Amino acid sequence: MERLTNRVKVMEQKPMSFMESLYLPAIFKGMAITFKHMFRKKATINYPEEKRPFSPIFRGLHVLNRDEEGRENCTACGLCAVACPAEAITMEAAERTPNEEHLYREEKYAAKYEINMLRCIFCGLCEEACPKDAIYLSETFAPSSFTRKSFIYSKDELLIPHPVNEPEKFEAAKGAREARQKN
Ligand code: SF4
Ligand code: SF4
C-alpha cells in the first residue's frame, strides 16, 4: 500500500516477561505516582466555594453605569454600537423631560439598550469608545442558559444598582474596577 509519509511505525506485540506477567510492579509504580501527588500543591480549587482572583485585564459582563446620584450616564450617542465589531449593541434614544432630571444625567438617554451576548466577543471596544463612562465590562460571567433569547441583555439587566438606594449592591457591581483604573 502506498503511504503518504514515512512516519508509520509497525508495532509488534512481544510476549510478556515474568515480572510483567505478575502485574504487581506496574501496580506499585502507579500507586507511588498517586501517593506522590497527594502531597503536592493542588492545581484545582473547590469552585464555587473558592474562586480564583480575576486577571487585571479580565473583561466580563457589561454594566451600564450611573453617577453618584444614581442618574444614568448613557446619552444614547451610539458610539459604542459603532465601535462594536460584532454589531452586538442596539439602542433607542429618547429626550429627557424636565421631571426626569433625577433619572438621566444628560438631555438624551437610552430608552432601550440591548447587548446580544451571543455575538459579543468581550473585546472592550464599547467601553473604550464611550465618552460618558457609561458602560464597562465587569468581573461577572454571563450565566449559561438554554435559550438564545436569554442572552440578549436588556437595559434593566445591564444597569448597575442604584448607589443611593442599594449601596452594597452598587459597590459589589463595581468590583475592583476603580482600583484597576488607578493602576
Ligand atoms: S465587548 Fe466588544 S463585542 Fe462586546 S459589545 Fe462591546 S464592543 Fe461589542
Ligand atoms: S454607552 Fe456610552 S457610547 Fe454607548 S450610547 Fe451610551 S453614552 Fe454613548
Image (spheres, grey):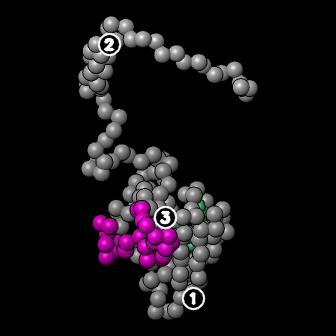
Element type where label 3 sits in the image: strand
Query: Which of the two discs, 3 and 2, labels the residue nearer the N terminus?
Result: 2
Q: Can residue 153 be seen from the camera position used here?
A: no
Distance Cα–Cα, label 2 vs label 1: 84 Å
| Residue at x 53%, y 81% (from the top left corner) | 112
Q: Residue at x 71, y 25 (%)?
A: 1
Task: Report helix, strand or loop for mark 2.
Answer: helix
Amino acid type at mark 2: Ser
Residue type beneath disc 1: Glu
- State the residue position of label 2: 21
- In the rendered structure, the answer to whether residue 4 lies left or right of residue 145 reads right
Comparing 144 with 121, the one in front is: 144
Kindly report which numbered mark, 3 or 2, lies closer to the viewer in this rendering.
Answer: 2
The residue singled out by tag 3 in the image is 62
The range drawn in magenta is: 143-169
Assign a secondary structure to mark 1: strand
Mark sitting on residue 95? 1
Gap between marks 3 and 2, in whole Å?
61 Å
